[in-house]
Amino acid sequence: MKFNTKTIHGGQEHDPAYGAVMPPIYQTTTYAQTTPGGHKGFEYSRTHNPTRKALENAFASIENGNYGLAFGSGLAAIDAVIKLLEPGDEVISTSDLYGGTYRLFTSIYEKFGIKFHFIGMDKAANIESYVNAKTKLIWVETPTNPMLNIIDIKAVSNVSKKHNLLLAVDNTFATPYLQQPLGLGADIVMHSATKYLGGHSDVVMGALMVNDKDLAAQLYFIQNASGAICGPQDSFLVLRGIKTLHIRMQRHCENGRAVAEFLASHPKIEKVFWPGFETHPNHAIARDQMNDFGGMLSFTTKGNNYEESIKIVEKLKIFTLAESLGGVESLSGHPASMTHASIPKEEREKTGVVDSLIRLSVGIEDEEDLINDLKQALS
Ligand SMILES: *Cc1c(COP(=O)(O)O)cnc(C)c1O
């Protein structure tokens, strides 16, 4: 099956009870047994639920994995991965990281004796100097938020394989439509399914996809033992979202390109961060490992004025000023006052999050309306 067919049919079967084409929402906690232990594969909905199972099979299929796991949020999925580790273990992570992931690593897991190194991974060779006998996991996010840096997954996986480490990739921004990390050597793919997989800004959910049977068994054990699962209604909604992932992504990419090119030609714009530009420092890697460049981009305005950027996001009408990304509707954000406000100015500026930086999640509306909206807000 090719990708577009997988988004609709991957891992799916018609419901055995009545042949329902869409999986029913099995809104039940428990399942009748004919004799103790005599059940049809489902005992209790923390452990298994048929609607969640249908979604987990779809998750596995779209990432070309053997196993998929659904969680109550993206962070719950990351939490399950870190629970594979033990006190004393070390993790090497990209420094340009989703803020919630950074908070989970540092505010929760450092307390339990896990050590995290946050480093730049543009050169995979940089990673090796941080590897020691305690290193267990490399955590990669690409493209990164909000600067749209690209990390070479295959090059990082050469390091992880050489030292027998697990490599996990947060594939939230790219989605499997653009990049499939398992095929590039990753062991674990993670998604905030809240974003593009769900795609309609109406569900918070997380996903893990893996190929290795033992690794999957450990993660299923953690999923059940820690219990950060998602409900059947949310499973149904994300499964429905996935069925249009390919056509949504195609439009996100087309509109992303149009908006990036419009902004790059606007006299008030200083710089546009979008991996599709040949001038982007990691363009060659993006071209190799991604099928297109996605609908996320950031830009700065000339003069780097904090108040002016606030005014721009306030004036945007079709781009709603809001946290999150990846839905059908366009969103804008001002990292310096929103997602990155808690990071001291000098620290955030080191990674490029300057006062005038605005991040856009370009939706699937008409391109002309999006560009006109930006035109009026910049005028
Ligand atoms: C949103 C996001 C997360 C966290 O996911 P939640 O579903 O909000 O818990 C992790 N990584 C990235 C890249 C994200 O954008």
Image (tube, rainbow, N blue to C red):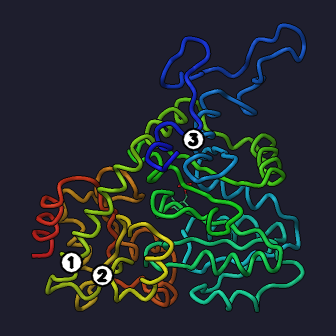
Residue that label 3 marks: 58
Residue that label 1 marks: 263
- Rendering coords of residue 27 (x, y %): 59, 21
Q: Looking at mark 2, is its residue's CB closer than 8 Å to ligand 1? A: no
Of the residues shown, which amino acid type is indicated by label 1?
A: Leu
Give the class, few, some or many, for how many residues have Cα within 10 Å of label 1's Cα (few <14, many ≥20).
many
Indicate left or right for 238 with 225 as reference: left
Indicate left or right for 112 with 236 as reference: right
Label 1 sits on a secondary structure element that is helix
Give yes or no for contact between labels 2 and 1 (Cβ–Cβ under 8 Å). yes
Q: Please, is residue 77 above or below residue 200 in the view? A: below
Residue that label 2 marks: 272
Of the residues shown, which amino acid type is indicated by label 2?
A: Val
- Rendering coords of residue 238 (x, y %): 49, 40
Q: Quadrant of the C terminus?
A: bottom left
Q: Residue furthest front?
A: 1
Depth check: 185 or 72 in front?
185
Give yes or no for contact between labels 3 and 1 (Cβ–Cβ under 8 Å). no
Give the class, few, some or many, for how many residues have Cα within 10 Å of label 2's Cα (few <14, many ≥20).
many
Q: Nearer the viewer, mark 3 or mark 1?
A: 3
Label 2 sits on a secondary structure element that is strand
Label 3 sits on a secondary structure element that is helix
